[in-house]
Amino acid sequence: MATSWGSILQDEKQLEELAKQAIDRALAEGVLLRSAQHPSSSDVVTYAPFTLFPSPVPSALLEQAYAVQMDFNILVDAVSQNPAFLEQTLSSTIKKDEYTARLFDIYKQVLKEGIAQTVFLGLNRSDYMFQCGADGSKALKQIEINTISASFGGLASRTPAVHRHVLNVLNKTKEASKILSNNPSKGLALGIAKAWELYGSANAVVLLIAQEKERNIFDQRAVENELLDRKIHVIRGRFEDVSERGSLDQNRRLFMDDQEVAVVYFRDGYMPSQYNSQNWEARLMLERSRAAECPDIAIQLAGTKKVQQELSRVGLLEALLPGQPEAVARLRATFAGLYSLDMGEEGDQAIAEALAAPSHFVLKPQREGGGNNLYGEEMVQALEQLKDSEERASYILMEKIEPEPFRNCLLRPGSPAQVVQCISELGIFGVYVRQGTTLVMNKHVGHLLRTKAVEHADGGVAAGVAVLDNPYPV
């Protein structure tokens, strides 16, 4: 997938000058992170790592990823409304994965006492890589779907101007015009605003659950600012603040001090390390409330790796989406090979195949946040340890996607510009809102491209491995 700036990647002096210009433009556009040394303060900021040039993405696959996003929204919504499917699918996982088990306990408790919400909000990001076939053909394959705290919608709306600037400096105005405009934060805010409106209390606020030490605050502020432009106020709080200052009235309306909360937007709570007993109590209070949650616990469970693996079974999509054969076909076309490691013959066979050809598989635990998957020798060691233990049911196996590498220059604070062989991961943001049983919003709202050096098997921008990028349609 050639681009017209390949030769510039060999000119060190020109690269150095371009990198300076690109970094200054990134800072001016607000492509920002708080510093690692001061994650609680915006006194010291730095640019978020990014590529010097946009990276080639096949136009047809970009279009396909956008076209299937509304189907994924409907699928997540259907799974979240199907307690029998969630219970059956996660039954083996919750025996051995304490974190998923705690989430599931809250889910069961809330179901038992009756769900108080009437408005349901999904802000998802479905992530893909481009599988390169032996004949050079490319296919879109889903890596995962993120149903909680899907990040970088804010910064992704700031990066197109940076790449256009770089190409304009090179007098490549035609190429610069091909970089797509992109504003996911506006679309995410549209979904939150719709849920807020349907909640029906003009003085209610949106509660954004965040960590105290949050380097990625500017990404979150982009969504907050979009909401404020719509006269919807956002308050930030930690789980600890909910414990100390939150309460439910007799109608299960949620209050922080004396402010009613219409929508809870989680940018925390997606990893086990983010919970202690106080935080679990706070999460339960939020789930029991009438406030629309993004996500509620059912939507979070719908995004687990185990659910992803089960959805690939023959006939399951048809059962969850009856009478929608076109949607089923679009969804299934993006599935990579996914394999259960539950105890029994099927799991034994999957492990045997992975041990025989480790370079073709990835071992995935039920975790979000990047940097959790195991590859190669690490995967082999883990499977040897797990193969006779019930703990293996808390993992899934996935076919390893092999994209075609390309060259780009990665810019990171404190490091020299680095020209390396890269691979990209494309994410599409989706938003849906349901009131009772009626879907009132279902749309795709933008994209995120993240790129990393080929030697890094796993990890995203927040994990310090990937950098922000833009698709250059080819």
Image (cartoon, rainbow, N blue to C red):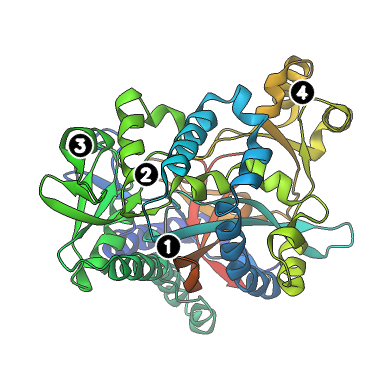
Disc 3 versus disc 4: nearer the observer: 3
Label 4, label 1: how far apart the Cα atoms are = 36 Å
Q: Which mark is residue 287?
A: 2
Disc 1 versus disc 2: nearer the observer: 2
First along the sequence among labels 3 and 1 = 1
Query: For mark 1, what is the residue?
Result: 156
Q: Quadrant of residue 365?
A: top right
First along the sequence among labels 2 and 4 = 2
In contact (CB < 8 Å): disc 2 and disc 4: no
**152 left or right of 456?**
left
First along the sequence among labels 4 and 1 = 1
Query: For mark 4, what is the residue?
Result: 380
SS of the residue under disc 1: helix
Label 1, label 2: how far apart the Cα atoms are = 30 Å
What residue sits 73% from the left and 18% below the top? 386
The residue carrying pointer 1 sits among few (fewer than 14), some (14 to 19) or many (20 or more) residues within 10 Å by Cα, namely many
What residue sits 52% from the left and 40% below the top? 368
First along the sequence among labels 2 and 3 = 3
Label 2, label 3: how far apart the Cα atoms are = 16 Å
Locate the N terminus and report the quarter of the image it occupies.
bottom right
Amino acid type, label 1 = Ala
Nearest to the observer: residue 174 or residue 287: 287
Amino acid type, label 4 = Val
